[in-house]
Amino acid sequence: MSQPQSVEDVKKLIKEHDIEFIFASFTEIRGKSSAKLVPASQVDELFSEGVGFAGFAAGEIGQGPQSPDIEVIPDPRTFRIVPWKKGLAHVIGNATVEGKPWEYCPRTILQNQMKKAEEQGFVFKLGFEAEFMLVDFDEDGKLQVADKYDNWGRPCYDVKALTRQYELMTRLSNYVTELGWENYAVDHEDGNGQFEINVTFSDALETADRSVFFRYMVDALAEEFGMIATFMPKPFTDNTGNGMHYTMSLWDKDTDENLFLDKNDPRGLDLSEVGYQFTAGILDHARGYMAMVAPTVNSYKRLKAGTETVRTWVPVAMTYGGNNRTQMMRIARSGAIEDRTPDFSGSTYLGFTAALASGLDGIQRKLDPGEPNDLDLYLTPPREIERRGIRTLPHSLMESIHYLVKDDVLREAFGQVPLDDEFGRPSDETEAFVDHYARIKRAEYHKVTDEVTTHEIDLYLRFP
């Protein structure tokens, strides 16, 4: 399906595909997608006036119960036919309040950062690899891998496990292709019950919109097959975690030339000076940036070095290298860099904003990431890592938030948001979005970690 550019294009698609209803959606700060079901007969009103939501009820988007409604104005370019539900379409929009853009809206935040890049002549493009697991609960309510036969010690690329999920995976692959995203591979990943469907790149806003629909699609189809699809970073202690790798590049706004590509790269990675500077920017801001791309307590249980018994395939240090999966920034193909730290437990709009802001700062300051690292950082002794001056990634959400609020570049990138007075009425005061975000995440951290667990009882009750 070709991507519509206008409301008139949307109307043509509605007629051609006999669309009866449209899900009009937006996402809040944590990445939750909310929607209302709108009759297709209301398409003119939908795109001109939007659809109203009680923002406080929908989630974290800077509103209280006293706040005026959020009006979501859909973007016609996000209109997609839902392949598995006849007569249904889906569209994504930006949150507005009283006719003005709402500064807490993650999609608006990303658009603002992309405009800054375009003013410098850049278009930010990404593709993503989102890993997920198919799970369910046993009779005792314990989480388990849905396929009881998927229990090998090394299940990566297992053809038999992939065959058992053939109907689900081929439908997903076909739908991705129907949507125009050019799916080029489906595979069983390294964890039991873990799969990945690769989605080709586009500009950052389109890719973020795709990710919202992709998650909705995977969730819905898994439920149809009687399973739960989880993107949770680490649902099992003894199983590989789920990541969402960003493959990134900058392109010339006028010529559509890949500015990260240099076949004469003296370092041999086919990456340009601009590409190295962008990489250096992300590495320089990595500790605060992590709060946006690995945004939950559970994220940091995934970000652990691999062992013989539990493989993780995730970075633990702020380094870059070639086709080496122990590095944070992996350069495995010409003209692109891959960040292996992100997961899909938050908002891709916010994650992409953090990546772009960090990379642009590296270009502005002409940072150099140094020579590529070729070590196996899982095996390299801590003393050697320290001797080489290699910095490690945050070990917890609280640590990454600590660095986020101190990062002036990220504070500027995410902008200011309005504050209410002590009675909940709008005021002229503002605060940095990252400070608002930090409060949400600190509360989340304590909600998870303040509860005494059975593991703690076993470990500490009679100790010392």
Image: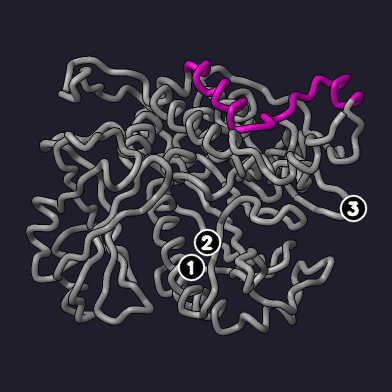
* Horizontal relation, residue 81 to residue 65: left or right: right
Residue range highlighted in magenta: 383-408
**Kind of residue indicated by mark 1:** Val
In the picture of the structure, the residue carrying the numbered disc 3 is 308
Left or right: 172, with 324 as reference point: left
Q: Residue at x 54, y 74 (%)?
A: 227
Q: Is residue 45 above or below residue 98?
A: below
Q: Horizontal and vertical percent for residue 336?
A: 61, 45
Numbered disc in front, either 2 or 1:
1
Quadrant of the snapshot with the C terminus: top right
Q: Is residue 270 visible?
A: no
Circle 1: element type:
helix
Disc 2 and disc 1 in contact, CB within 8 angstroms: no
Colouring of the image: one colour
Compared with 166, 156 (above or below) is above
Quadrant housing residue 304: top right
In the rendered view, tell whether residue 324 sits above or below residue 213: above
Dot placed on the residue nearer the N-terminal end, 3 or 2: 2
Which residue is identified by label 2? 199
Q: How far is mark 3 from mark 1, CA to CA?
A: 31 Å
Tag on residue 271? none
